[in-house]
Amino acid sequence: GGIGQPLCLLMAQNPHVKELCVFDLTLAMVPAAGVAADLSHLETKCKVTGYALDKDDKPVDKLGECLTGCDLVLVPAGMPRKPGMTRADLLGVNAGIAKNIVEACAKFCPDAVVGLIVNPVNSVVPAMGELYKKKGLDPTKIVGVTTLDVVRANKFVSEATNTPVEAVAVPVVGGHAGETILPLFSQVEAMKSYPADKLEQMDKRVQDAGTEVVNAKNGKGSATLSMAYAGARLGKAVLAGLSGEKVEEYAYVGSSITELPYFASKVVFGKKGVEKVLPLPDNLSDYEKTRLEALKLQLKGEIEAGLKYAEENSLA
């Protein structure tokens, strides 16, 4: 798909990747075998194999060869939100799609880190984490990919303050939709002299950045290339962690740093995947504290929708 192909291209260039398995449905515009053949010509050590299922096939029955031995599974999947659809409608469709893949991971690679790029992330990740828990598996293996919010915040701050982007690191916490996305500009040196009356505008731009892309693509797509870049950034951190480094990156995970059971914040990746969830800074601005309390209310409802899905379903 739109995210999957560029994500595969980027992951194939990661030195930690020994083998890349590309999976899609047979109804995809470009066959998975074709994407795999194309990527297999890159000058990298990575072996690439393609797998495809018909839409009525169950991954838990058919993806054994694809998933066995995987250390990291990145899942860009699901329907985009269509006009008139509520978040509940979208969750109903996309949680089912995510569940099919997560169920197969539970069977064939239960120790792999599963990075979910499936909207609504705020609900789908808690749903899949709780399903893993119900199955007796480690729910910390389920990770929501929110790195795109960090990537965007870094780029926007770099441009607005004329600071090299590599010198900017904006913590973005909360969730991965609209007002649940909270960039903590108070923690960024480059923003210390930024006009206070423009801070809210910058905050809003990070929240609504996806719409910028949708509008620019004129209804013909959403953020795919930047999402692939952000997914690969998370993938790089996970694989570096699994190889023995301690790497910090932002992700939406099971968490106890707030009163909510899931939250996006900085986490430490290591040999077992998520090894530690780091606390929020204690010197937030008053604006950020107010925003944090407001976003918790919204995020709480979205998490509860995911937990309800997990109550009503089980992995095979």
Image (cartoon, rainbow, N blue to C red):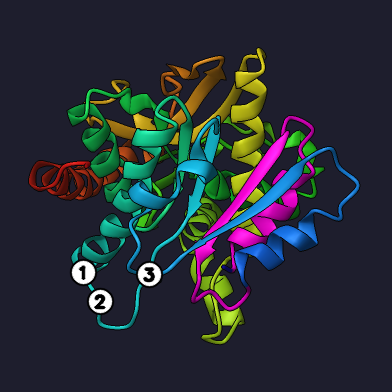
Q: Which mark is residue 89?
A: 1
Q: Quadrant of the N terminus?
A: bottom right
State whether residue 261 is above or below residue 120.
above
Query: Element type at marker 2?
Result: loop
Mark 1 and 2 residues: CB-CB less than 8 Å, in contact?
A: yes
Q: Amino acid at mark 2?
A: Met
| For marks 3 and 2 on the same chain, the one whose residue lies earlier in the sequence | 3
- Position of residue 109 measured from the top left corner of the image (x, y, whole percent): 44, 31
- Position of residue 270 measured from the top left corner of the image (x, y, whole percent): 56, 16
278 to the left or right of 233 = left
**Can residue 12 be found in the magenta stretch?**
yes
Q: Which mark is residue 55?
A: 3
Label 3 to label 2: alpha-carbon separation: 22 Å
Q: Which mark is residue 308?
A: none
10 Å neighbourhood of mark 1: few (<14), some, or many (≥20)?
few
Q: Which residues are magenta?
A: 2-30
* Residue at the image point whose x is 16% and y is 42% from the top: 314
Q: Nearer the viewer, residue 231 or 43?
A: 43
* Residue at the image point whose x is 55% and y is 35% from the top: 72
Disc 3 versus disc 2: nearer the observer: 3
| For marks 1 and 3 on the same chain, the one whose residue lies earlier in the sequence | 3
**Residue 107 falls in image quadrant:** top left
State whether residue 222 is above or below residue 117.
below
Q: Nearer the viewer, residue 291 or 197?
A: 291
Query: Element type at marker 1?
Result: helix
Q: Which mark is residue 85?
A: 2
Query: Element type at marker 3?
Result: loop
